[in-house]
């Protein structure tokens, strides 16, 4: 993870950019785009079924009370639909969730960032709720494989080279998507470009290339999978909204409260109800949809909005009766699902900061292929941490946040889950990460100020309701990534089944909080339109 911008399309280039064309389409249409001449059967089915709803409000069931479900509920409630949220957990928010770490401070178990600040509704909500955000200077500490810190000037140089190649990869992918081999990875492209950027004629070119190669591994913390498996063909789908990338320094708590407020006040919410089957409208004899839960309960609705994570959809293809259309089922299978995890470790004081010298840490630290922790990290997994002690006085706390992905995420999550007590889990994590925090400035192993006092490790890989992972991404071998997203985004409206979540978002917001929010909003508007409450919908008698 990095505060570096991941928006590379210039304003003048947006007219030809796939990702910006898609955003414009999503923002200017409510997307019930059914042509009566081309799709007469669908129009007739929708009209007949919805025309049976008389003398009452249409009943909408929303499976999942994360940000997509909550935003969808808000839109529908504004248009007087009867809304029920069916949530498997005992709380709202889904992945957006906070836990107490040290006295007076919460931390986010889920997203930490607002990706892009320009025309971003989550940024607007942050401002309205007085949610603090933060960023860091360009200063980056890089520790090489021997444990030695690279000079600040070289760190800036190598990081700049890496991000320059990432930028050209976005441009190349956007321009040449149709011609790129599906099996070509971002790393393949990176390797070709790096040999041009650092030619053999430069002194120590091998060592310099190796450092930039290792820095490229940090891309995994963006998407939850390794750079080796990142699709180059669909790399353009990873571009984000322009503007800054900001860390939400006092958590998403108040933003979540604002988004959830309409649902709490006006919708029905069923907590602890895990859905295991949705029986959809497949013919004219079934006028409503039925939702079945693991607890044996059955609920009936006129429409169902399914906001379960992509990982859940992948693992439960049999949850829908009749089965999902072949193209939709294939789209769900095609798109990748990441495994990003985090570990927070707190100390009595932020020993790595100093008011006396200029060698303190502020922001990010990258540990490249560490060879000094062979007992615990024989694979030399790259490590990345973020300093949380550099914000304003009310938000800063002496905590380091480590991001992990891929095999390291799987290993640590499995190992921590085996331990029988909170104390043993903490001891394991303190020891596992000691080789890294002990290399920060001013560390003294004999000082109590340098001994951890609290920690928290996420375990989304063990969370069935989270789909045992993090969020969507695009892996090598993918043939039609953009069409797959559009297919999931469309859902099955003629059966009364709609999909929402970060995996159905506008391309520019896939995998983000903003994407989840926008996806729920879009489905809400489409349902409003379908019931004749918006332009082009099917009229329903009241």
Image (cartoon, helix red, strand yellow):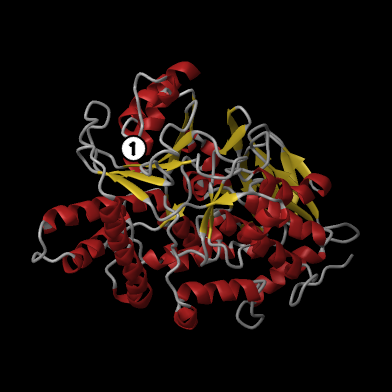
Q: Report the number of numbered marks.
A: 1
Of residues 504 and 434, the one nearer the viewer is: 434
Q: Which residue is mark 1?
A: 408
Is residue 171 placed above or below 418 in the rendered structure? below
Residue at x 43% of width, y 17% of height: 424
Q: Secondary structure at mark 1?
A: helix
Crowding near the residue tagged with mark 1, few <14, some 14–19, many ≥20 C-alpha atoms within 10 Å: many
Residue 270 visible to an observer of this rendering? yes
The answer to which image quadrant residue 30 occupies is: bottom right
Residue at x 10% of width, y 60% of height: 203
Residue 234: where, in percent of width, then height?
38, 66
Residue at x 35% of width, y 53% of height: 219
Q: Residue furthest front?
A: 356
Is residue 259 placed above or below 86 in the rendered structure? below
Residue 316: where, in percent of width, then height?
51, 44
Is residue 354 placed above or below 22 in the rendered structure? above
Q: Where, quadrant-wise, is the C terminus in this rendering?
A: bottom right
Of residues 205 and 110, the one nearer the viewer is: 205
Residue 52: where, in percent of width, then height?
82, 62
Residue 292: where, in percent of width, then height?
67, 41
Residue at x 67% of width, y 61% of height: 521
Of residues 268 and 47, the one nearer the viewer is: 268
- In the image, taking residue 334 as reference, residue 93 lies left or right, namely right
Residue 279 visible to an observer of this rendering? no
């Amino acid at each position: 993870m990095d505060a570096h911008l991941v928006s590379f399309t210039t304003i003048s280039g947006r007219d030809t950019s796939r990702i910006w064309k898609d955003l414009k389409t999503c923002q200017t249409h409510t997307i019930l785009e059914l042509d009566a001449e081309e799709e007469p059967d669908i129009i007739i089915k929708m009209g007949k079924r919805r025309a049976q709803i008389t003398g009452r409000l249409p009943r909408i069931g929303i499976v999942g009370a994360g940000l997509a479900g909550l935003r969808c509920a808000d839109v529908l409630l504004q248009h007087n639909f009867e809304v029920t949220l069916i949530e498997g957990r005992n709380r709202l928010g889904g992945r957006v969730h906070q836990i107490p770490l040290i006295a007076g401070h919460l931390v986010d178990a889920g997203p930490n960032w607002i990706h892009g600040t320009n025309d971003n509704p989550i940024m607007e909500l942050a401002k309205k709720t007085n949610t603090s955000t933060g960023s860091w200077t360009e200063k980056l500490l890089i520790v090489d494989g021997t444990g030695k810190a690279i000079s600040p000037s070289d760190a800036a140089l190598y990081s700049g080279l890496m991000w320059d190649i990432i930028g050209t990869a976005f441009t190349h992918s956007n321009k040449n998507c149709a011609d790129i081999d599906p099996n070509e990875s971002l790393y393949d492209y990176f390797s070709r470009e790096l040999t041009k950027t650092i030619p053999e004629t430069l002194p120590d070119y091998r060592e310099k290339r190796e450092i930039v190669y290792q820095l490229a591994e940090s891309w995994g913390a963006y998407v939850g999978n390794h750079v080796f498996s990142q699709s180059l063909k669909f790399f353009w789908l990873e571009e984000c909204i322009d503007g800054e990338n900001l860390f939400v320094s006092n958590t998403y708590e108040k933003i979540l409260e604002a988004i959830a407020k309409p649902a709490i006040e006006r919708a029905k919410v069923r907590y602890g109800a895990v859905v295991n089957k949705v029986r959809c409208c497949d013919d004219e004899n079934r006028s409503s949809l039925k939702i079945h839960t693991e607890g044996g309960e059955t609920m009936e609705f006129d429409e169902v909005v399914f906001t379960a994570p992509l990982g859940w959809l992948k693992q439960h293809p049999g949850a829908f009766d009749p089965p999902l259309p072949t193209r939709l089922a294939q789209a769900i299978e095609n798109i990748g699902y990441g495994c990003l995890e985090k570990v927070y470790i707190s100390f009595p004081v932020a020993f790595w900061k100093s008011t006396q010298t200029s060698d303190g840490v502020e922001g990010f630290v990258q540990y490249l292929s560490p060879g000094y922790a062979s007992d615990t990290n024989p694979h030399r997994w790259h490590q990345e941490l973020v300093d949380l002690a550099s914000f304003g006085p009310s938000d800063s706390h002496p905590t380091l946040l480590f991001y992990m992905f891929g095999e390291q995420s799987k290993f640590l999550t499995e190992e921590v889950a085996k331990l029988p007590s909170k104390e043993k889990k903490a001891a394991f994590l303190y020891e596992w990460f000691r080789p890294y925090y002990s290399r920060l400035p001013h560390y003294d192993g004999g000082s109590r100020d340098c001994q951890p006092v609290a920690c928290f490790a996420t375990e989304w890989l063990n969370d069935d309701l989270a789909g045992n992972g993090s969020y969507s991404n695009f892996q090598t071998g993918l043939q039609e990534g953009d069409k797959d997203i559009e297919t999931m985004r469309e859902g099955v409206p003629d059966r009364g089944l709609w999909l929402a979540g970060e995996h159905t978002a506008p391309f520019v917001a896939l995998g983000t909080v903003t994407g989840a929010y926008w996806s729920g909003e879009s489905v809400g508007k489409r349902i409003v339109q379908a019931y004749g409450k918006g332009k082009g919908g099917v009229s329903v008698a009241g």
